[in-house]
Image (cartoon, helix red, strand yellow):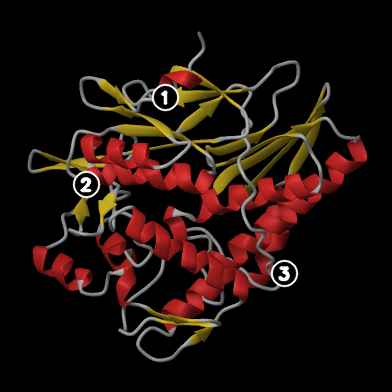
Amino acid sequence: MVTMNHPSNATRPAPRVWLPPTQGAAGPGDGWLAGEVAARVAQSARMTVEQELHKLEFQAMSTHCRMNCHGVAASVAHDFQREVVEWTAQFEARYSRFIPDSLIGRINAAAGERWVETDPETDRLFGLCQELFFFTRGAFDPTALPLIKLWNWKQSSPVLPEDKNIQAARELVGWNKIQRRPGGIFLPRRGMALDLGGIGKEYAVDCVMNLAVQRGIPNVLVDFGQDVRVRGHAPGKKFWWVGLDDANHPGKCWAGVAVTDHAVTTSGDYLRHFVANGRRYGHILDPRTGYPALNDCRAVSVIGPSCTIAGLLATSVCVLGAKEGLQLIELHPGAAGAVTLDTTKLYSRKFHEYLPA
């Protein structure tokens, strides 16, 4: 979780994704149909102005979203706010797994039966998934949905899945098992399924920031479910302040980082976990084993050149563990991270450059 004071962070523009407005998706249990998403998201939008800061808040992708900007005419800011709401609704509608007629829903429904057509932007998104699958050594795997469905952290009395069911689900998991070609994707076994939850919000944040760059908006904060990216600076400041949630005292910050033209994300199991038979089970799965990651990482905060990279690194460290995970962060130019363990904190070499003097 990332809590913020004056958040806003930018990175290099991510590729813009165009999405047809007739596609749709929903969050868990929402029951929305494709054509209803745009109306739902638009109805939730609230636009305000606080001195020179134009603020937008709305609900999408089952989370709270906000975008703040300044340094442009009010008419430009208002047009951009409307564009952000529309674009985000279209993105959710196309890539959520919770609605049957979304693209992801149709791909999953066709598993083991037929190829599904994809557009060039989706091909690029899936290409990115492939790169990240290998870069994270399999810690990120968009095909892990069969395993995710076995583990239910929302039950009042969680039940551990049986080992045989976990092993059966593992047979359906593995990004290297899917088949892709330009303009199409095929999941070769019935029961295989995609879930872009490990990359979707972060990727959307980067795309919205790219829209801001294209519109010439110099100072922007994009925050989708506390996955944050900023460009420029907060009003009257030289940067944006982003507070990092304290895993040991949720809702309070253990530090604040000063960032501009970067992203900040935090992953961890400190809010969602259960204890069964004396063992702690967090909500972050290791798709390579089928079980929740077993290490003493409670939270990982990463500052990176894009929200997609920062988010993937944060989650991957939670899976890989502090030692291997920090090594992974060091391998990525422009990234820095802090790992909260049960009794201490560990940092990458560059993390302290973002802390106030």
In the displayed structure, 289 sits above or below 349; it is: below
- Residue drawn at 53 percent across, 44 percent down: 307
Q: Secondary structure at mark 2?
A: loop
Location of residue 179 (image quadrant): bottom left
Of the pair 52 and 56, the residue shown nearer to us: 52
Location of residue 266 (image quadrant): top left
From the top left corner, tell me how far across and down residue 164 is, in percent.
10, 69
- In the picture of the structure, the residue carrying the numbered disc 1 is 351
Residue 33 visible somewhere in the drawing: no
Q: Secondary structure at mark 1?
A: helix
In the displayed structure, 73 sits above or below 60; it is: above
Of the pair 101 and 325, the residue shown nearer to us: 325
Kindly identify the amino acid type of the residue bearing the numbered disc 2: Ala
Residue extending furthest left?
A: 277
Q: Looking at the image, is mark 2 or mark 3 earlier in the sequence?
A: 3
Kindly identify the amino acid type of the residue bearing the numbered disc 1: Phe
- In the picture of the structure, the residue carrying the numbered disc 3 is 21
From the top left corner, tell me how far across and down residue 153 is, in percent.
29, 49
Residue 115 visible somewhere in the drawing: yes
Q: Looking at the image, is mark 2 or mark 1 earlier in the sequence?
A: 2
Location of residue 56 (image quadrant): top right
Foreground: disc 2 or disc 3: 2
